[in-house]
Image (cartoon, rainbow, N blue to C red):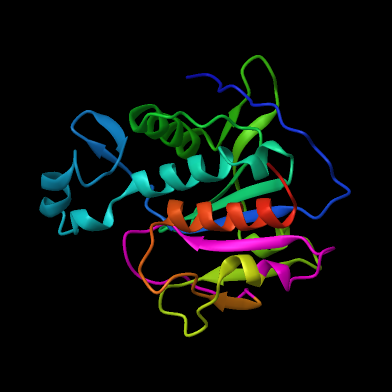
C-alpha cells in the first residue's frame, strides 16, 4: 500500500468549520508470529491473554467506524470538516485530512494504520501530499484559537438535545468535538470548554458522531 485515494469536497474556508478529536483509540502494533499487526480482540485474543492483557480492550474497529461516520457525512462532503485528530491509548497522535478515503473494510484499514504507525505518514496516490501523518502532542496546539471545544461522555450530568445545543453556539466559532474511540472508560476532557451527554443511553462513537453531524447539517442546511 503505497498511497490511498482522495475524495472531492466543496471547500469553503469562510464559514465556521468542524474538527473531530478521537481519544483513546485502540491502535497498538505488536509482533505476532513473524509479522507486525494491529492487535484486535477477534484475531489476537490468545496472544493478548498470554501477555496478561484484556482482549476486550483491543477494539480498533471502533476508530474505523468512527472515521467512516465522519468522512461519509454530508458535513464533510460540503467542506465543513477542517481536520480529524486521533490519539491512541498509547499517546500517539495523528492527523487525518478531510479528503481521505478511508478503506471500508477493516482488514484494509488495519493495513493502512499499521503502515502509518510504522512509517509515520501516508501520502495520496500519485502525489506528495500527506493524507495521514503522526504529529507531536498535545493536540491543543493544532486547534483554532477561538474554537469551542466540546467533550462527550455518557456519564456527564449535562444531558442535552444535540440539535438544540449546537443552536446555542456562536455561529462564527469553529467547533471541536472530542469523542472517545475506546470500548469502555472515560476520555480526558481537561482541554474542553464543556462536557455533555447527548443520550441517556451509552452510544457507540460512530453513533455519537452521526448525531453530531446530523445536528450541524440541519443547523447549516446541508442536505
**What is the tally of numbered marks visible in this picture?**
0
Q: Is residue 54 above or below residue 33?
A: below
Q: Position of residue 104 (x, y in %)?
A: 43, 29
Determine the image quadrant of residue 131.
Answer: top right
Q: Position of residue 65 (x, y in %)?
A: 42, 44
The answer to whether any part of residue 82 appears in the image is yes
Q: Residue at x 49, y 74 (%)?
A: 197
Viewer-closest of 110 and 152: 152
The answer to whether any part of residue 138 appears in the image is no
Q: Is residue 215 above or below residue 82?
A: below
The stretch of residues the image draws in magenta is 166-192
Q: Position of residue 67 (x, y in %)?
A: 50, 43
Determine the image quadrant of residue 169.
Answer: bottom right
Residue extending farthest right:
14
Q: Is residue 166 above or below residue 25?
A: below
Q: Residue at x 47, y 85 (%)?
A: 157
Determine the image quadrant of residue 151.
Answer: bottom right
Quarter holding the C terminus?
top right
Viewer-closest of 78 and 81: 78
Amino acid at each position: 500500500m503505497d498511497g490511498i485515494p482522495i475524495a472531492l469536497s466543496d471547500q469553503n474556508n469562510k464559514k465556521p468549520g468542524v474538527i473531530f478529536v478521537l481519544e483513546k483509540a485502540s491502535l497498538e502494533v505488536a509482533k505476532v508470529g513473524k509479522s507486525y499487526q494491529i492487535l484486535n480482540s477477534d484475531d489476537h485474543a490468545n496472544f493478548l491473554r498470554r501477555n496478561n492483557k484484556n482482549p476486550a480492550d483491543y477494539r480498533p474497529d471502533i476508530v474505523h467506524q468512527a472515521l467512516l461516520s465522519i468522512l461519509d457525512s454530508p458535513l464533510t462532503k460540503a467542506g465543513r470538516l477542517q481536520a480529524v485528530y486521533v490519539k491512541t491509548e498509547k499517546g500517539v497522535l495523528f492527523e487525518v485530512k478531510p479528503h481521505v478515503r478511508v478503506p471500508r473494510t477493516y482488514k484494509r484499514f488495519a493495513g493502512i494504520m499499521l503502515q502509518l504507525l510504522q512509517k509515520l505518514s501516508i501520502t495520496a496516490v500519485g502525489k506528495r501530499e500527506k493524507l495521514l501523518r503522526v504529529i507531536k502532542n498535545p493536540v491543543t496546539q493544532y486547534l483554532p484559537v477561538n474554537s469551542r471545544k466540546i467533550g462527550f461522555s455518557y456519564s456527564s450530568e449535562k444531558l442535552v438535545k444535540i440539535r438544540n445545543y449546537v443552536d446555542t453556539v456562536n455561529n462564527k466559532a469553529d467547533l471541536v468535538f472530542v469523542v472517545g474511540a475506546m470500548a469502555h472508560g472515560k476520555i480526558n476532557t481537561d482541554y474542553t470548554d464543556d462536557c455533555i451527554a447527548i443520550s441517556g443511553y451509552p452510544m457507540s462513537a460512530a453513533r455519537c458522531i452521526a448525531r453530531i453531524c446530523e445536528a450541524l447539517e440541519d443547523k447549516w442546511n446541508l442536505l
